[in-house]
Image (cartoon, rainbow, N blue to C red):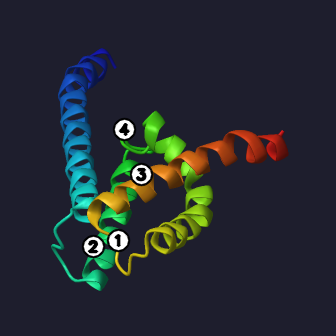
Amino acid sequence: DEASDTTSHQELPGKLEQSSCKKGIIHVCTIILSLSLFGLTFSPIQLLFQQGIRLVAVVLTVAIIVTGRLEDRQSIFLSNRVIVHLGDISYEVYLVHWPVIIMWKSYFDLPVLPFTDCLMCLMITFLISMCIHLTLEQMFIS
């Protein structure tokens, strides 16, 4: 029994190194996937046709979730406080973004939003969404 105990203790550091290396590779893959998704989504230059961007965004999002699941816990990206907060306000962003865009285009009489106007609409959308989340939604949750 002592011989088997010593061999299992000797194998342990090798397994820890492999596990640590695997986790490192998963973290790097998650970061690369996340940055790719961010770049494709928010690039001012149209890199792919609209349906192509949607497809790539869905595939990369699934890949991020799967790489987080491989560790039996969420990845660093998905457990990041900023990303969690964005997830918390995502429904408000969904509800608010379109009225903000329509009002902006109507007020400035724009048929198409230039990039700077898109950024302004995005900032206004997030501001309104955070206000709704921190007031109305939190009040109903508690």
Residue appearing at x 58%, y 69% in the figure: 99
Which of the 4 image quarters holds residue 22? top left
SS at mark 1? loop
Mark 4 to mark 1: distance in Å? 34 Å
Give the amino acid at mark 1.
Leu
Res 23 visible: yes
Secondary structure beneath dot 4 equals: loop
Label located before the other in sequence (3 or 4): 3
Name which of mark 3 and mark 1 comes first in the sequence. 3
Q: According to the image, label 2 marks what residue?
A: 56
Percent x, y for residue 91?
61, 59
- Between 124 and 30, the one lying in front of the other is 124
Vertical placement of 112 versus 63: above or below?
below
Give the foreground label among 3 and 4: 4
- Residue matched to label 3: 69
Q: Amino acid at mark 4?
A: Ile
Comes first in the chain, label 2 or label 3: 2
Report the Cα–Cα distance between label 4 and label 2: 21 Å
Residue 76: assigned label = 4
Instruction: Specify which label sits upstream in the sequence, 4 or 1.
Output: 4
What residue is pinned by disc 1? 113
Crowd band around label 3 with a 10 angstrom C-alpha radius: few (<14), some (14–19), many (20+): few
Q: Left or right of 142: which side holds 31?
A: left
The kind of residue on which mark 2 rests is Val
x and y, in percent, of residue 63 in the image: 32, 61
Q: Horizontal placement of 139 versus 106: left or right?
A: right
Q: Secondary structure at mark 3?
A: helix
Q: Which label sits in the foreground, 2 or 3?
A: 2
